[in-house]
Amino acid sequence: MEEACIPMRLESGLVIAKGIHPKEAYRATRADVAATMSMCNSKGWAVGEIGLDYSTKEHHPQQKFTLAEFFRRVDPSSNMVLHLRGADEDSCSRVPTQDCITLLDGLGVSIQAPIYLHCFLGGPAQIKLWIDTGRQEGVRAIPQDRILVETDSPYLPCGVGRPMTPKHIGKVYQLVATLRGESAEHLAEAVTRNFCTLFAK
């Protein structure tokens, strides 16, 4: 049930992320969430993927319950890797994004809590939702000291076909750099700095 530990390489070592994927959240209990948070906090791991995935029609209330349980346990140093995916007709993931923001606000999660918005499909409207709440993510609108880049294999191809794999990261960098009007090298330098800052714990 738990998300596999995902290593992310830093110059000084690895960052580990552990969570309960939203598609598995229907099987999770408060005790599962508490154990996952306890492990992440004690080991300095990021919490994730956690979030809401409405690409299937089942278990949305259970996903919200599990995500809320995670949010109740975060502190300003808890790195969260959020997975927000909408139904097919909600291609920009507006509904899960708004539901997530409502939970964050309703539970009083600090806007200082480090969030990595993974599985990002949205455009300017979704970016505005995050900016309006102080949680900034997107493409053109992301400040230089906030941007991160990834391949979300295999579901979110960006002109490279399916399945998308980590080997396509260079093409993703080039696409994002082009959208932002900067070089891929400049973007890579910023991403490296931001990654090290976000996962400094």
Image: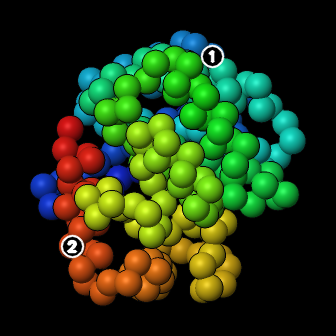
| Residue 103 falls left or right of residue 115 | right
Disc 1, SS? loop
Which labelled disc corresponds to residue 189?
2
Residue at the (66%, 34%) spot, across then down: 99
Neighbor class of circle 2 (other Cα within 10 Å; few <14, some 14-19, many 20+) is few
Residue 192 pos. (x, y %) = 23, 65
Q: Quadrant of residue 124?
A: bottom right
**Amino acid type of the residue tagged 1 in the rendering:** Thr
Mark 2 vs mark 1: which is more N-terminal?
A: 1
Q: How many marks?
A: 2
Q: In the figure, 22 relative to 165: above or below?
A: above
- The CA span between labels 2 and 1 is 40 Å
Residue 166 seen in the current view: yes
Residue at the (52%, 17%) spot, across then down: 107
Residue 153 pos. (x, y %) = 58, 67
Residue topped by disc 1? 29
- Quadrant of the snapshot with the C terminus: top left
Residue at the (30%, 27%) spot, across then down: 76
Disc 2, SS? helix
Residue 174 pos. (x, y %) = 42, 85
Who is closer to the viewer here, 36 or 149? 149
Neighbor class of circle 1 (other Cα within 10 Å; few <14, some 14-19, many 20+) is some
**Amino acid type of the residue tagged 2 in the rendering:** Glu
